[in-house]
Image (spheres, rainbow, N blue to C red):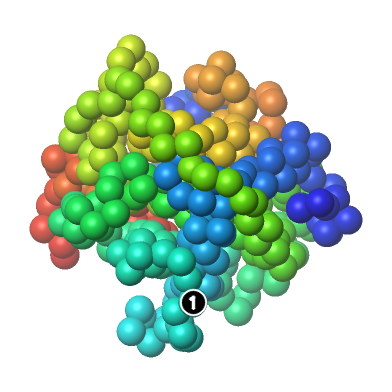
Amino acid sequence: MLLRASSDAVGAEVDLSAAVEDAADGGVENGAILTAFAEAVVRATDDLDAARTRALETLGPEKFVEAAATVGIFNGLVRVADSTGIPSDAQMLERTADVRGPLGFNRWGGAKSSGVAEAPA
Amino acid sequence: MSFADRRFPVPVRGDMATALRRSWADIGRPGAWWTGPERVAIAALARAERIQRNEPPWNRDRGEPCTPLPEKAVEAARKIGADPAHLDREWANGVIAEIGDSHYVELASVVVTTAAADAFCEAMGIDHEPLPEAEAGEPARERPDGMGDIGAWVPVQVIDWKRANVARALSLVPEGVRTFFRIVAAMYSGTATDFEKMVWDHRPLSRPQVELLAARVSALNQCFY
């Protein structure tokens, strides 16, 4: 996954469980602010206004817009992958082999398209 | 003008706003297989369903169907819009058997563009952009060459492909690729060269920050890819 590769590139150790845990920072600067913001948008929760305000105040307007853009575009990208059943790239499957099982990714429906599906928990 | 600068609570990069405007206008134009009014209807259905994503499908308010679309297209727009984690090959095959693979892929391209733009507005704290006016005209009905089977539910470009698979997922409808991946470049990846770099200097956020957001959104949607 690109989170690990990009963290490795700057010599940082990332905790990939932040992908599946609420408001986790993963060892990334302002990570908990970012993930809480993403969660509030995707889940449309009542604390969205507060999460947005925290993100804007902490990050500043330029970075806030980038965060909003990333959350927005990935709501489209996940639908591209999941509506077409596109298989994951071989290189990505290889790089994530050690974490997909423990993080539960192999139990998601889309894993079937890449031939690595495990039975749902 | 859509996505007018005055609507944003804080300034949005010019190239991002321009890309959103262009892709939004594309939704209202005749596509390769659907007319402008049909494409706007697809966007409207996907939006209405996605807004109710926290409700189970059987409990959503859908009102009276008032659409030029076939029943299976209505179902697909709603399901891709609001329940992407619950799609599977059998379901997609059933839709494709009714409406055709090209129509299905173009429909998906409209839904994903709408979902991305709507989620961006929600993140920014502004109302969804009004849907574009539908333009008159006939679909081009052109199917590209070089399509093949790589195990996806739809044919994709197979000639000399060296990029990520997701970038060819919609390649059966090149107009759909242009519409959606224009905003992908502006909102996330930058150029192909930018994307290959693991250290980003073309965005205010660091790449690990961007990828943490990407990973979290993907996981919340239970997206394996």
Res A66 visible: no
Number of callouts in the render?
1
Residue hosting label 1: B66
Residue extending farthest left? A119
Q: Residue at x 12, y 52 (%)?
A: A118
Q: Is residue A32 left or right of residue A51?
A: left
Residue at 18% from the left image edge and 35% from the top image edge: B151
Secondary structure under badge 1? loop
- Residue at the location (48% across, 86% down)? B63
Q: In the depicted view, which residue is nearer to us: B97 or B197? A: B97
Between B94 and B221, the residue placed more toward the observer is B94
Answer with the quarter of the image where residue B132 lies.
Answer: bottom right
- Identity of the amino acid at label 1? Cys
Residue shown at 41% from the left, 37% from the top: B141
Crowd rating for badge 1 (residues with CA inside 10 Å; few <14, some 14–19, many 20+)? few
Residue A52 position, x and y percent, is 70, 63
Chain bearing tag 1 is B
Q: Position of residue A94 (x, y in %)?
A: 24, 28
Q: Residue furthest right?
A: B6
Would residue B136 be seen by someone viewing this image from the given angle? yes
Please determine whether, in this image, residue B54 is positioned above or below residue A52.
below
Residue B153 appears at what percent x and percent y? 23, 43
**Screen quadrant of the C terminus of chain B:** top left
Q: Classify B5 as above or below B58.
A: above
Image coords of residue A114 (percent x, y)? 20, 39
